[in-house]
Image (spheres, rainbow, N blue to C red):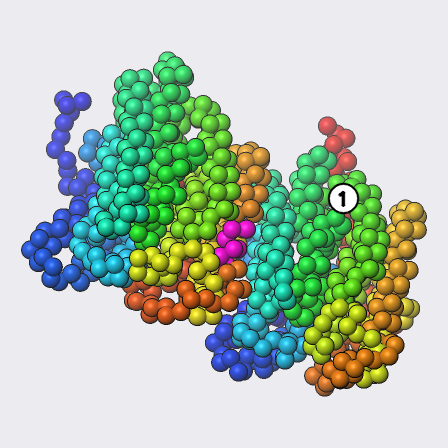
Amino acid sequence: MTLLDVVLHLPLIGFFILLALPKQSSRMGALIISLVIFVLSLGLLGPFSNGAAPGFAFTHNDIWIAVPPIRFHIGLDGLSLWLVLMTTLLTPIAVLISWKHIDHRVKEFFAFLMLLEFGLIGTFVSLDLFLFYVFWEVTLVPMYFLIGIWGHERRIYAAVKFFLYTMAGSVLMLAAIIYLYNKAGSFDYVEILSQLQSGRLVFEPSTQLLLFLAFFGAFAIKVPLFPLHTWLPDAHVEAPTAGSVMLASVMLKMGTYGLVRFCLPLFPDAAHSSAPWIAGLAIAGIVYGALVAMVQPNMKKLVAYSSVSHLGFVVLGIFSFTQQGLDGAVYQMLNHGVSTGALFMLVGYLYERRHSLEIAAYGGVATPAPTLAIVFLITTLASIGLPMLNNFVGEYLVLQGAAQANFTWVVFAALGVILSACYMLWLYQRTFYGKASESVSHHIGDLTPREWAAIIPLLILMVWMGTFTQSFMPPISAQNAKILEQVNKTQVKVAEVVHAR
Amino acid sequence: MLDNFLPPTSAEYFRILPEIILTIVATLILFLEGVFGDNKKGIYAPLTLAGLAAALVAAFAANGDQGPAFQNMLLIDGFATFFRVLVIGIGVLVVLGSTEYLARENSKGGEYYALVLYSIVGQCVMSTANELIMIFIGLEISSIASYILAGYLRDDPRNNESALKYFLLGSFATAFMLYGVAWIYGATGSTNLTMVRGALSSSNGPSLSLVGVSAALIFVGFAFKISAAPFQSWAPDVYQGAPAPVAGFLTVGPKAAAFAILLRVFLTGFGPVASVWTPFVWGVALATMIVGNFGAILQSNIKRLLAYSSIAHAGYVLVAVTADSDIGAAAAMFYLAAYAFTNFGAFAVVTYFCRKGEKYVTVEDFAGLAQRQPGMAAMLTIFLLSLIGVPLTGGFFGKFYIFKAALDSHLVWLTVLGLLNSAVAAYYYLRILVVMYFKEPGESVENLPPLGMGLRLAVYGSAVGTLFLGIFPSAVLDFATKAALK
């Protein structure tokens, strides 16, 4: 029983506690449970405090099912550490921002939020492919209900589309996982990796490509990578604020996490050979997402398309196969979680006041709500990558890494940075500046203490991550270096074996 | 072989004790009903449950003393025990799930329970049969009782349609099977599966075309019983028309037993000529999944939807049969167990919900159920997630083991197409979740009756079973693996 076990299982226990608690206390209950989980999860930083990556920390490796051997194997490394912390941080925030907004079937809402946290943490810490798949699917159910019950008008369409898209992607991953098991005799990630590196297990490039594509398809849908992104704007726009925040900040990272954790080390040759294509799609997504965001009349849709654009950077960084590119990509996963999560929260704040997501319904909001305007501005600047704020670091590293791989990529990807400034600042201008109409000044008040409490941690992180990168980067870098090393080792082995034939 | 005829030993009777107990209890019920007439109608359900419990114990006890019985006509092995326990367990759920329905329809009567018991006796015989004629007899015992059950509410025209269709197509199917048995007897000189296997694996065995024809005929007969495409057309009408708990029973009990004989005949008897029949079963499996899933998308009646879904699930199990391996047989057995809990559970919720005269049976009627009856909605959610194949439910592990077995046997395309099918299936199951949780309650969820004890046990028991198989699958899978044939 390690601390990670506790952090993983508490949300599940919280789910049952909330179901048992009376309706009136479910808000408070959810807040307390999720805060306790967050505080406990800070303890996970311990082994990473001196920056070295000690392999997997907090491992728990036990038999779950004897035949075929499926293990309950979890552990934490520099890659999963921050994603777990982000999950535990954003869950109490999601509780806070839903405090008033959710007024019917309150108990189920917070219970599903807990179940979602359980699934998300599980996905990030699983070291058994089968266990990973289980958690991966488990996250679908609560999110499906969060969108479908508490969403906006077209919520049912969005919820079903979300479920089916993800399901369709993941069944092929399941086939690939079974195939891997048949070859390696184990579902254990660590075991399979060591077999690959020692050359006991070798996949021909053609087999590798199919396996890679099966995994990649599931992850690319989740990221989402252009052109598989069409579920995302629907899901985001229709989801309640907390759903959008969890979806953007954490759930999309399941896809990019999977790419780094599984696609690269397990199938390095296939990943290498398809990198140009994937980079092309990533760049297309960066530019396309930005252009589409530019013309959106709906704020939430704008932020959703900006996610498509931002996540394109992450994928580009991953498939640059360089230290900087990977560091930037992983850092950008966190940045995107912080700043886009904050944007969705702020849009939600506006929606709660004005009950509209149309940009045209606003204008001059800065007059009645000056501090809201300032917070929104900081978040906007962070999102467009202003130096000293978090996104700048990630985007810069990604571009640098991509430049080492192929300079033309950078030329196009940099367009996305410029475009993001256009659409975000334009959004800001149309919403906050100008003369406040009667209805705006009548409905819109400034931030309440509860709203402050929810947004402040994210504001602090924007500045902190933008200025003191070293507080976060060492475990990430160390882990990425290890992944690149694994990629090289496996590639060499494959080359040897194929050559020997 | 009359020259070495010996009277059956007591051990042999002990091996068929479950069937004996069930037959005695069923006959006793019919007798008591004659004695008491319209009085004391409450005693039959407890009596049936007691009989089933005793049979369950006997089935486990018989497993301790495995071996053939009655001139090798029956074979009590792990495989037989697995299916006997499964169908008797299904019987328990069916009895629990039926009492309220019968009371509601003013049709409380002993003969319902007696027919359920007779049907289960037939299925037990199918599970243990090691001989084609015994299989035929078991199939007939099970089927005839089932035909009557399907038309149990005889004043209801839908019940009549259901029973008549089931009877006509069912007899047709058995005729095919019997014709195939005749061919195989002609080809090998025996109807005993062990001897058929011996004849087929010997070098101077019968010609492959002869064996192929008999295997095809027998398979067609079985395909009717498991509702495999293109012999599935009866299933939606029959399941829709039959009383809800009976429909639930028909989708799991007779089907499980039919798969038992399919596995026994094709993996044991026709095992040596697997290369002849596997391509054929491959195609049938794929067609069945596609017909079931795409048919279900169009349905608005929930019983009909579940009927099409049960066709699709037969397709998944056929994938495991196509794998033609130990692992495949074990996967099929596990799947049938998980499916029994899941699907009967779903039908039990429908039984609760449909009310007198099965008034509310469309998917739309479930609108807002989650707000009026969150407990029942949650249970139906578990069953639907299991049918979709979401992890932590039995349905997920069932699918996982099946497709793992298929990949072990290098059926890559069938696996990929099957998995994609299961993604399509998510769509129509989600529709039920959508109306239950996302739609506002209508008139159909007002005045829901209280949930009686029997139905409560059936629903919650099925849910516990579904989740148990989804979290701790090892216990059942280990048993199935040890019992798997070959």
Residue A167 falls within the magenta-colored stretch: no
For the question of whether residue B189 can be seen, the reply is yes
Kind of residue indicated by mark 1 = Ala
Determine the residue positioned at 63% across, 51% down. A165
The range drawn in magenta is B427-433
- The image quadrant that residue B258 belongs to is top left
Give how far across and how far down residue A205 sits, in percent: 73, 35
For residue B431: magenta? Answer: yes
Asked if residue B231 lies left or right of residue A430, the reply is left
Q: Nearer the viewer, residue B314 or B185?
A: B314
- Say above or below: A356 vs B159: below
Residue found 27% across the figure and 44% down from its top: B160
B250 to A112, vertically: above or below: above
Q: Residue at x 28, y 52 (%)?
A: B91
Q: Is residue B450 above or below residue A416?
A: below
Q: Mark 1 packing: few (<14 Cα in 10 Å), some, or many (20+)?
A: many
